[in-house]
Every structure is written in C-alpha cells, then in structure tokens.
Amino acid sequence: MQEALEYVKDAEVKSFIKKFTSLNEKKAKELREKLVGLELIKLNEGHISKIIEILPEDKDELSKVLPDANLDENETNTIISTIKEYK
C-alpha cells in the first residue's frame, strides 16, 4: 500500500490514505505470515487481509471486522496479541 502512494499526487488524498495504512510493506508481510502460522481454521485470506488493514485493538473491534468468523475466546486473544506485536 505504501508503494501505491508514490503514484498519488494530491497531498490531501495521501494524508487520508496514510491514516489507514499504519504498517509498512515489510511489517504487513511479517504479520500476514504470523497470522497464517497460527493455523486457525476459521481465518481465511480475506479475514487476514482485513485484520492487517484495520489492525483491531481489542476483541470488540476484531468481532466487528470479522463478524462471520465466529472466533472463540482463545482464538480472539491469540489474534489480538499477535497484532499488538506489530503496533
């Protein structure tokens, strides 16, 4: 996402986009690998992408980001603690 910003000319648009892209490409890739490595059956690639885009900070935010995942308490805590490593 950060690389795509090179092509955006409008400063206001760049500023707006940066609010939603808090991880650089390297960290986003590392987080993706870590989330995939958790081997949670309920997490698919779409879920992982949403998590990386939004970086939910707690259980409530995660459940709003992934309303269809039906994660249990342990899975939710594991995902949140993994995200916190990259904030």
Image: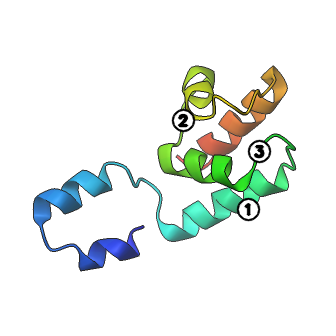
- Per the image, the residue denoted by label 3 is 43
How far is the residue under mark 2 from the one under mark 3?
15 Å
**Which of the two residues, 46 or 12, is positioned nearer the viewer here?**
46
Q: SS for tag 1?
A: helix
- Per the image, the residue denoted by label 2 is 56
Q: SS for tag 2?
A: loop
Mark 2 surroundings within 10 Å by alpha-carbon count, few (fewer than 14), some (14 through 19), many (20 or more)? some
Front disc: 1 or 3 = 3
Disc 3 residue type (three-letter): Leu
Look at 83% across and 49% down and name the residue there: 38
Disc 1 residue type (three-letter): Glu
Total tally of numbered discs in the picture? 3
Disc 2 residue type (three-letter): Pro
Mark earlier in primary sequence (2, 3): 3
- Where residue 1 sits, quadrant-wise, is bottom left
- Where residue 75 sits, quadrant-wise, is top right
- Per the image, the residue denoted by label 1 is 33
